[in-house]
Amino acid sequence: MPNKPKVAFYWCASCGGCEEAVVDLAEAILDVVAMVDIVFWPVAMDFKRKDVESMADGSITATFLNGAIRTSEQESMARLLRNKSQLLVALGACSHLGGIPGLANLFDRAGIMQEAYVRPPSTINAEGTLPRTHYGDNGHSVELPAFHETVRSLDQVVDVDYYIPGCPPTPKTFLAAVQTLLGGAPPVKGTVLAPDCALCDECPRKDTKPEKPVFTEFKRPQQMLVDEEKCLLAQGLLCMGPGTRSGCEALCVRGNMPCTGCYGPTSRVRDQGAKILSCLASLVDSKDETEIDRVLSTIPDPVGTFYRYSLPGSLLRRKRPDGARQAPLPTR
Amino acid sequence: MLSRHPSAPETSQSTFEPRIVAFFCNWCTYLAADLAGTSRMKYAPNVRVVRLMCSGRVDPQFVLDAFAHGADGVFIGGCHPGDCHYQEGNYKTLKRYHLLKRVVKEMGIEEERFRLEWISAAEADRVRTTINQMVEKVRELGPLNLELKELDKAHAEEVLV
């Protein structure tokens, strides 16, 4: 198989859902395997780092890397794969914009360590032992990757050629992206390989969307019986559809749940959270300051809602470092 | 990217000069600032004014971009409620401001660094007093140090343990 394009898959700070999306191609994965030669895929096949190190620079046609970058090991693998690959493709929301792990940018490293290893009610750690990068005992030594202060998207660490959005990307999005890349006319570098319009455009409830939905309260799905036909914004639910790229075929809305924004913004928007905030706030149905505040207070966690998948990739990237707030104590 | 004003010294705590980005609407606050100028009023020179047709044009991205590129404060000036040239642009600003302020605060930026004022075309003195107040407040708070290059620098210099 000398002429087939060589492809690699790797994961960093992620849940494994993107790898699952590749497997979810089901029979179509046979088409992909027929088109390419998989040279590195630790999650599914037995390869080691040294196998990649022994490859010539640029010998991998395309690497699909999912997950954000938090540890020194992830950073070094991202750099290694960048050098070995002609194309580096950020696969999934974490790699694209930081994803769910990126919400840790609301905290600093010290707070996270305390929260994970010292404070939990079920933990007894009187000496406050924390993970170390190096541990020596009886002439043996053990190394752990270092934990960075900030979570970064892939393009904040190495040069990225293309992005495949989604948490996870749907098999259809992934397959279409692979076909685009293998086709004769590759898109402009930096392209997000999904349609470039808002989710509302492909939403099955599009026709029931009022010209201007208004809010007297932002409801949450568990607080109400959600109508299965009507636009979710028109029902008072906070749906990220107007500020999110399409391509998922409105999977969540079809499941009667509002969009949470995993496909990221369209190409005209730099900061998804700021833009959807702008859209939803201006739909509050009042001109009175006290009432506006009351309506907006029904959004309990604006950062976690509007930046659920995009905090590291946003304009501010993280909570201001010298004012980093303490991780909240668990309620006992 | 905002360039450093030639008269603004390096931002060390002792010589800190706040940099404030102000978005003024064309019909009220910008005219008030103009009037303050022609009336020879003096106010702190720390504000860089951006004229927009309406305060409703202030995309929250503009505010965050200003903070991310070195502004120590952001000031929005618009018409009084009911006076908007475009009927309700300032109400949209008001609603966005209330929500964006919560985001800004949660991102570790003191809320006093982000201010919205209604200033009509006649209120030149209000331009002077509100700008002076804000500059003083931000001076007390100190530099924001949020420039992205600072973040990259911190990352490069991070001691990993």
Image (cartoon, helix red, strand yellow):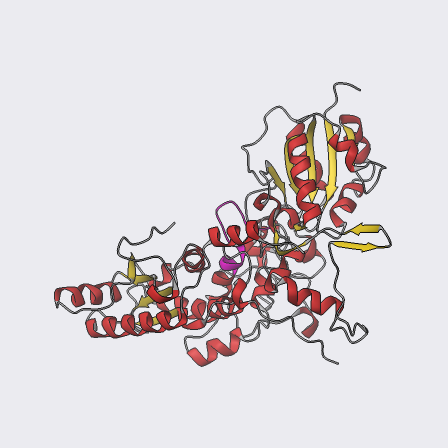
Q: Position of residue A172 (x, y in %)?
A: 71, 41
* Residue A169 appears in the figure: no
Asked whether residue A101 appears in the rendered view, the answer is yes
Image point 80% across, 27% down: which residue?
A: A34
| Residue sticking out furthest to the left | B39
Q: Nearer the viewer, residue A224 or A28?
A: A28
State whether the magenta stretch is mostly helix, strand or loop: loop
Residue B147 in the image: above or below residue A187:
below
- Residue found 62% across the figure and 23% down from its top: A184
Please name whichever residue, A276 or B62, is drawn nearer the observer in this view of the structure.
Answer: B62
Residue A265 lies in magenta, yes or no?
yes
Q: In the visual, does A226 lie left or right of A33? A: left
* In this rendering, position of residue A67 left or right of residue A322: right
Name the residue: 79% across, 43% down.
A24
Image coords of residue A62 (percent x, y): 68, 31
Instruction: Please determine whether, in this image, residue B116 is positioned above or below residue A274.
Output: below
- Region of the chain picked out in magenta, as a range: A264-276
Q: Is residue B118 left or right of residue A124?
A: left
